Image (tube, grey):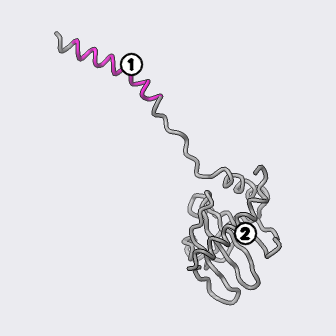
Amino acid sequence: MSTLASTRRGFLLSATLLPLAACTTTPAPKYTLSPRGDRLVALIQRTGRDNMTAPEAFALMGITNQGRDIPVRQLADDGDDGRYVVNLVNIRKYHEFVFQRRQGDVLILHSADTAFKRLVSVRYARNGKPTVIADTAFAEQDFQQQTAFWFDRIPGR
């Protein structure tokens, strides 16, 4: 009889503590966007235009559409030192940014996640082929300049 009573007590004790344990281990919701990323996505979706971009430079960044043009939502604006464009790409079923800036006959493109971490940078000459930028210091400096340009234009900073 004592084993049956101890088993019953153990069951009752675990039954009363189980709901308490469940309340303390609820995970926090996971968000894929940073707050700034969320606001920039909303700005692009609200004021940007649907566009198709050439796949060559995007392929060097790992963004492919099996050789076809890449569908993007695009927002462009002129700055003091060139034309700035931000592309919202959703080809891999999650949001990615591709920032680009025209400097004369050269486009500088940066692929970034929604937390604004630079992933790959590409230089694309008008009459040439795109190449990955190996100089990380230059790429990071240009990426920071391009993101700062768009951060100034995000409402609700």
Q: CA distance from mark 2 to mark 1?
A: 58 Å
Q: Main secondary structure of the magenta part?
A: helix
Residue pointed to by mark 2: 51
Occupied quadrant, residue 48: bottom right
| 15 lies above or below 77 | above
Q: Which residues lie in the magenta part?
A: 5-23
Sort mark 2 into few (<14), some (14-19) or many (20+) by Cα contacts within 10 Å.
few
Q: What's under tag 2, amino acid-wise?
A: Asn
| 68 lies above or below 40 | below
Q: Identify which residue, 118 or 86, lies in the foreground.
A: 118
Residue 154 magenta-drawn? no
Residue pointed to by mark 1: 16
Residue 8 magenta-drawn? yes
Along the horizontal axis of the image, is 60 left or right of 80? left
Along the horizontal axis of the image, is 54 left or right of 136? right
Tell me residue 75's x, y (percent): 76, 65
